[in-house]
Amino acid sequence: MKKLIVILGVACISASVIAQHVVRIGSMEFVVKKAERDTIVQVLTDNEPCPPCPTENKTKPKFLPYNKTYFFGGVSAVYPDHSSSYYTVMGGRSVNLDAGWIHCNAVTRWLGLGGTLQYSFYNYNLRDAASETKFAEEVIGALFPDDDIRRQEYRSHNAAASAFARFYLTNHNIRRVARNKVFIDFGVQGDYALNKFCLLNTRSDGKKRYFDDYVFNPFTASAIARIGFGSGWSIFARYRLTDAFNQRVLPMDLPRMSIGVHFL
């Protein structure tokens, strides 16, 4: 006890000369601090952190909804359907092009809602439409033999809009641009054809365009799906739910499925 009193006395005298002094005895540590008018003695043990650490906050950060609008473009190929219900198309030469704006609202960590405003171009490279009797009568007005036809295509320039639900598969807790996450979209798309026609190039009659607002439907609806990989691109599929041609006039329609890539 006398030894402890002596050490405390020495510590207090030293504190009058210096601002802080530390004396350690076994597992105990004496810290003497000099304030403006008072001398403070603090006793610490090895069981206490030095200095004491604040308690860890283990509460989950609150999610803040956010939204983002960005440009996108893409290309897809028509998937041929060789059944008797559809005209035969050349898959590698039949393409769709899309360009427009996507707006997406991330409402929870895993769910977003959005839509698009876009221009869509559809080109179907046909093989047997112009030589089919009903198509030749209603659209072209004449029947051409197969060996006279160089190229036959149906083209449509459309203004389109879509709505979709986006499900985030990764990075749920990171609040950042929606297109930078891995996600999957499901939605619907509506198209209005601004300009639609059949392009026919024959050896006997040359290249001509045939327009018919009654045979070619101006409005179409499609189901869409998109899988994004968090690096600015996605795999895209579109399935047309309605007919491209008026089925009361023509016996067959165009294939409904197209698959491609969108760059976000």
Image: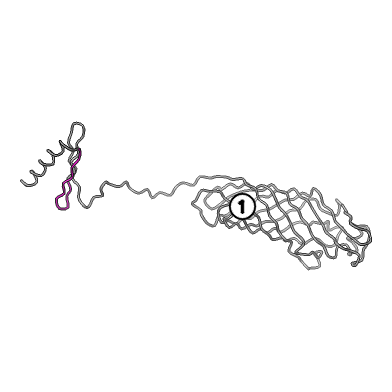
Specify the quadrant of the image occupied by residue 144: bottom right
Q: Main secondary structure of the magenta part?
A: strand
Secondary structure found at label 1: strand
Is the residue 124 above or below the residue 28 in the image?
below
Residue 146 is left or right of residue 180, and the answer is: right
Is the residue 252 above or below the residue 100 in the image?
below
Please report the residue visible at 93 percent of the width from the left and 58 percent of the height from the top.
205
The stretch of residues the image draws in magenta is 19-29
Percent x, y of residue 236: 66, 58
Percent x, y of residue 72: 65, 50
Residue 220 is left or right of residue 213, and the answer is: left
Magenta-span inclusion, residue 109? no
Seen from the viewer's position, the closer of residues 65 and 17 is 17
Please report the residue visible at 7 percent of the width from the left and 43 percent of the height from the top.
6
Please report the residue visible at 20 percent of the width from the left and 47 percent of the height from the top.
44
Specify the quadrant of the image occupied by residue 87: bottom right
Q: Name which residue type carries label 1.
A: Ala
Residue 70 is left or right of residue 31, and the answer is: right
Percent x, y of residue 24: 16, 49
Q: Find the residue positioned furthest to the top.
A: 37
Residue 235 is left or right of residue 3, and the answer is: right
Q: Which residue is mark 1?
A: 165
- Image mark count: 1
Percent x, y of residue 51: 26, 46
Please report the residue visible at 53 percent of the width from the left and 45 percent of the height from the top.
65
